[in-house]
Amino acid sequence: MKKIFNAAFTYMIIGVLAGLFYREFTKANDFPEGEFTQLGVAHTHLLTLGFIVLLIVLALDKVFGLSGTKLFSWFFWLYNVGVILTAGMMVWHGSLTVLGQQSNAMIAGIAGLGHIALSVSLVLFFLALRKKVVVGKAVTGDVEATSLSR
């Protein structure tokens, strides 16, 4: 659970810094206000996918004890790879846009790999969660709660 908490906290910091970078980088380069760049949505992706989603995962881990399973380990690391690749390519692509340069297929391809990693990891997460829900026991402190399937 500590890894999940630390990752969520890290993404919160990076997300806020990405928003600051967007504001200052576009201002420093006289980028027209209101014109679209991927920099404008990179911080929201980091805050949502990194911070908020991992806080929800942390709560579900607290209830169902997911983090001790092999499926969850695969989910966690693959999910983080996906978030980092996706957000990194958004920052790179957005920075090129602000600088007036063209993006290329490599950036789109790497971003696509990030999205694939996110998709596969979310399937793994639901498989890990399903195992715990179907078993019928959720752990809430010292008291066991009944399953969601009943």
Image (cartoon, rainbow, N blue to C red):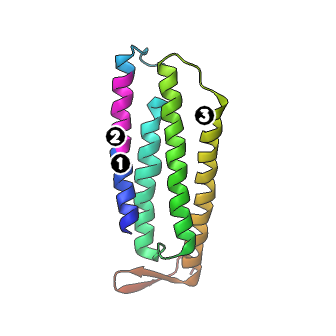
Left or right position of 110 against 92: right
- Disc marking residue 121: none
Question: Which of 127 and 147 lies nearest the eye of the viewer?
Answer: 127
Do the residues under discs 2 and 1 have CB atoms within 8 angstroms? yes
Dot 3 or dot 2: first in sequence order is 2
Does residue 68 sit above or below 83 in this rendering?
below
Check disc 1: other Cα within 10 Å, few if <14, some if 14-19, many if 20+: many
Question: Which of 128 and 6 lies nearest the eye of the viewer?
Answer: 6
Left or right position of 111 against 57: right
Dot 1 or dot 3: first in sequence order is 1
Q: Secondary structure at mark 2?
A: helix
Q: Which residue is mark 2?
A: 16
Q: Which residue is mark 1?
A: 12
Q: Residue furthest bottom?
A: 143
Is residue 22 covered in magenta?
yes
- Amino acid found under the numbered disc labelled 3: Ile
Q: Residue at x 50, y 27 (%)?
A: 94
Query: Do we see residue 147 in this rendering?
Result: yes
- Disc marking residue 107: 3
Q: Residue at x 57, y 70 (%)?
A: 71
Where does residue 33 sit, x and y in percent of width and height? 41, 17
